[in-house]
Amino acid sequence: MFKLVKEWLGGNKQASAGLKDIELDKVPAHVAIIMDGNGRWAKQRGLPRVAGHHSGMKNVKKITMAANEIGVKVLTMYAFSTENWKRPKDEVDFLMKLPQEFFPLEIEELIENNVRIQMTGWKEGLPDFTLKAIEGAIERTKNNTGLILNFALNYGGRKEMIAGVQDIIRDVQSGKLRAEDLDESKFSSYMLTADLPDPDLLIRTSGELRLSNFLLWQLAYSELWFTDAYWPEFTESLFLQAIAEYQRRGRRFGGI
Ligand code: FPP
């Protein structure tokens, strides 16, 4: 327990400084991250865009371990949106191959740390090899009880809400649901994230200040935190800074 914390306190001065600022009993249960800036990170170094995605993939485990260590329960990472299909074919192909590389490389360590893999998004449209990699990881970790590492893959918030509304209409028409019984909690149960709490904190890297169709329903009351750092250079120390700032904010959920 707290192996990383001890390492940070012993070695990584920046991270341990961040750690002193956070209260371990007030850690957000669900953190969602828009991992942006991979392309710009690569361009800055004279590398192809995909090199940025590869470096970004390596960062996923590092931040997962940090989140797990401090007691975050769910970490949702925006890995591929329904709009990302518009990118050049080579880049889409590369992104689709990342799960195939990521899981064989990292699964043992994720299992050792009791991490459970989940996915939010549409399986239809994903290549078989991508699905096989992620479904294999979901199956192997399904009994783990630690942090849920949830990949938003082929996910779009508007599509999710339209699909949810269509399901609601079907259920009302078949008599399974009465229109007057539809409330916020019921609506949430029609979202792809029905079994997860709403994110407490959203982090977006790379200086862009928008939601980009990510968890539109679920982020209604989340705290938003932005950094100029590109995703491949996002560190544990920045993650802890985000948590510390979240803890300093007063969440009122519309009250006073
Ligand atoms: C946005 O940066 C990033 C993505 C569309 C892909 C994010 C995916 C990963 C970091 C890897 C996920 C890992 C697994 C295992 C699925 P961008 O390309 O839009 O950057 P830019 O705005 O600088 O061009």
Image: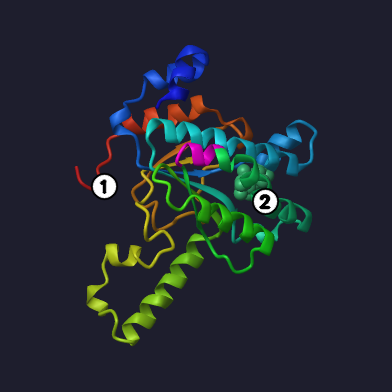
The tag on residue 100 is 2
* Residue at the farthest bottom position: 174
Which x, y percent locates residue 51? 74, 39
- 34 above or below 130? above
Q: Quadrant of residue 39?
A: top right
- The residue at 36%/76% (across/down) is 168
**The C terminus, quarter of image:** top left
Q: What range of the chain is rendered magenta?
A: 109-114
Q: Residues within 10 Å of mark 1 (few under 14, many from 20)?
A: few
Q: For the residues labelled 1 and 2, say whether their Cβ atoms are less than 8 Å apart.
A: no
- 120 above or below 4? below
Quick check: 223 left or right of 179?
Answer: right
Q: Secondary structure at mark 1?
A: loop
The tag on residue 253 is 1
User: In front: 135, or 112?
Assistant: 112
User: In front: 206, or 164?
Assistant: 164
Question: Could you tell which of marks 1 and 2 lies nearer the N-terminus?
Answer: 2
